[in-house]
Image (cartoon, helix red, strand yellow):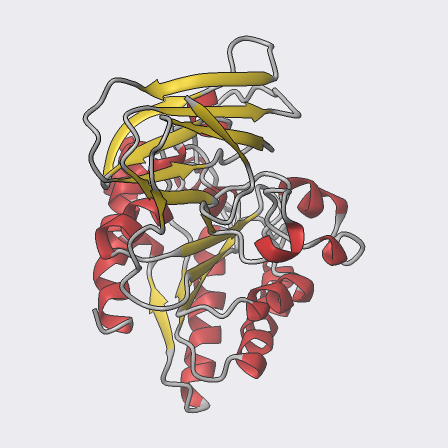
Amino acid sequence: MQWIDFPDERFAVNGLPWWKETSPKLIRLPERYEERVRPPVWGLAQSPSGGRIRFATDSTELGIRAHFPRLSHMNNMPRTGQLGIDVWVDGGYWRPVIPAGDDPDMEVTVFAEKPAQRREICLYLGLYGPVEVQAIGLSDGASVEPPAAFAVEGPVAYYGSSITQGGCASRAGNSYQAIVSRALNLDFVNLGFSGNGRGEPELAEAMAEIDACCYVIDFCQNCPTLEELEERYAPFLAIIRESRPETPIICITAIFSTNEVLSADARQPGMREIIRAAVAERQGMGDANVYLVEGYDLLGPGDRDGLVDQSHPNDMGFTGMAGGLEPVLREVLGL
């Protein structure tokens, strides 16, 4: 096996829109934002959720060397989703690779002794933990070619909460963005920040920097009050619109949470009304490229088996969310 140091221009990096600025760091915001966003947001940006390494090769074997700076443990999400690098070949799932025990350094042979034929490799990076990919191993003399093109130029850029970031998929390739993007052959960017998707203007400005084919706004649950959500939601849309006057924007209301059953004063119904009103306001201003998607149409009260706790989807829930969003994206993007 030959080990090719990463990064290497032969390996495409998708889902990290500031990659040319941040390389070799696989992070979700450029360093010039460190002083502009709250410390929790910057810390979460070190996890490369949505990041993918893609290439085509006729290699008979594949290896990965990586270092994991932080081996934390989550109560509601397995390490395969939190940290694991999810390996997909020719659009099909093969396996995750994860650090063993408390060893932060990993060298894994993903596969070996396969026929020498062209394969599309996609490595989904972990959803909730930083990683340093050091090298990719291929058989001696193997070719490395660009991966296949996406259906449209520009990624779908998502902003939101822990649900958006990928909590609590069992593997990185099972976030709802990854599922729907495979179905429609789309690139995507994940700017979900666990517990911290509060609609700050700095994040709207970051979103607007991304030359996206569509923006999906999926935040509300992290706002501690209805007043904060109302103060921030419409201005968040306006900031994106100022820089991207024609790009479609899809706004998603809150998906179902069992908190709505358990709590007499659940905030979700009020949050949905605020989002509906903000979308209606923009549409009333003549903005024909703002769309509303009801969270209940993605994961509703009848889908509670799709939750791993009170509010975060499991793989079943994310599959349902992707299925509900797919026809909307297909129509909005003219696919």
Decide if residue 10 is in sight here.
yes
Residue drawn at point x = 59 percent, y = 62 percent = 229
The x, y position of residue 94, in whole percent, is 27, 27
Among all residues in the image, which is located at the extreme top?
Answer: 101
Among all residues in the image, which is located at the extreme bottom?
Answer: 286
The x, y position of residue 155, in whole percent, is 41, 62
The x, y position of residue 131, in whole percent, is 58, 31
Determine whether 176 is above or below 205 in the image. Answer: above
Among all residues in the image, which is located at the extreme front?
Answer: 141
Q: Could you tell me which quadrant the C terminus lies in?
A: bottom left
The x, y position of residue 240, in whole percent, is 55, 74
Residue drawn at point x = 55 percent, y = 25 percent = 66
**Across the whole image, how many numbered discs are drawn on residues?**
0
Instruction: Give whichever of 254, 136 is nearer the camera.
Output: 136
Instruction: Give whichever of 304, 113 is nearer the camera.
Output: 113
Residue drawn at point x = 69 percent, y = 40 percent = 43
Instruction: Give whichever of 320, 206 is nearer the camera.
Output: 206
Instruction: Give whichever of 307, 322 is nearer the camera.
Output: 322
Left of 272 or right of it: where is 294? left
Which corner quadrant of the image does residue 111 belong to? top left
Decide if residue 258 is in sight here.
no
Q: Could you tell me which quadrant the N terminus lies in?
A: top left
Residue drawn at point x = 53 percent, y = 49 percent = 192
Determine whether 308 is above or below 320 in the image. Answer: above
